[in-house]
Every structure is written in C-alpha cells, then in structure tokens.
Image (tube, rainbow, N blue to C red):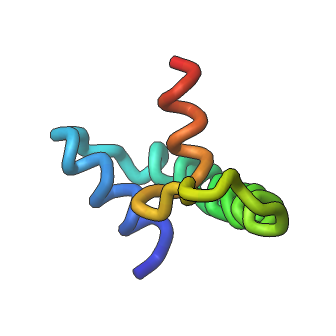
Amino acid sequence: MESRDIVKAKLAEWGLSPSDADLDELAPAYETMLRWNKIVSDMLDSRPMTPGMEFPTSEPILIHDIARYR
C-alpha cells in the first residue's frame, strides 16, 4: 500500500476526506515521520529499560511522545 493510501485511510477513520493536493503534502510528511520513528525506535532499543518495563509496541514511539506533550 502506498503512503498516500495509508494517509487517506487513516484520515477516513476520523471522517476526513483529503484532496489530492492535501495527499501530495501529507504523504511525504508521513514517510518522514516513519523514517524518524525508526531512528528513534532504534535509539531506544539500543539501551535497556528498567526491569519490568517495556517500550510501547502498539503504536509508533513518536505517536506516544506527541500524545504525552499535547
């Protein structure tokens, strides 16, 4: 599935219908977010956490950080 399709599907979950121009802007931003999410995840996985704690695996790491600071 292409980034445009993923972005469109995720926005549809919120009842939003992006235009083609919107998708042209959002798809590259989504790809950049995924790339940085991988970098941050790799950095976090390279160091141990406190015993008994696990890194969140249900959503990208950056999503959890964004939600925490809203």
Observer-nearest of 40 and 50: 50
Q: Where does the image place residue 28, in percent across and percent down from the top left? A: 64, 57
Q: Where does the image place residue 63, in percent across and percent down from the top left? A: 52, 44
Q: Residue furthest front?
A: 51
Q: Where does the image place residue 6, in percent across and percent down from the top left? A: 39, 65
Observer-nearest of 45 and 27: 45
Q: Is residue 17 above or below residue 10?
A: above
User: Can you say which quadrant of the picture contains the N terminus?
Assistant: bottom left
Q: Quadrant of residue 34?
A: bottom right
Q: Is residue 14 above or below residue 8?
A: above
Q: Is residue 53 above or below residue 15?
A: below
Residue at figure coordinates x 82%, y 62% from the top left:
47
Q: Where does the image place residue 10, in percent across and percent down from the top left? A: 31, 54
Q: Residue furthest left?
A: 15
Observer-nearest of 35 and 12: 35
Q: Residue furthest top?
A: 70
Residue at figure coordinates x 49%, y 68% from the top left:
3
Please say whether residue 28 is visible from this viewpoint: no
Q: How many marks?
A: 0
Please say whether residue 3 is visible from this viewpoint: yes
Observer-nearest of 67 and 13: 67
Residue at figure coordinates x 45%, y 56% from the top left:
59
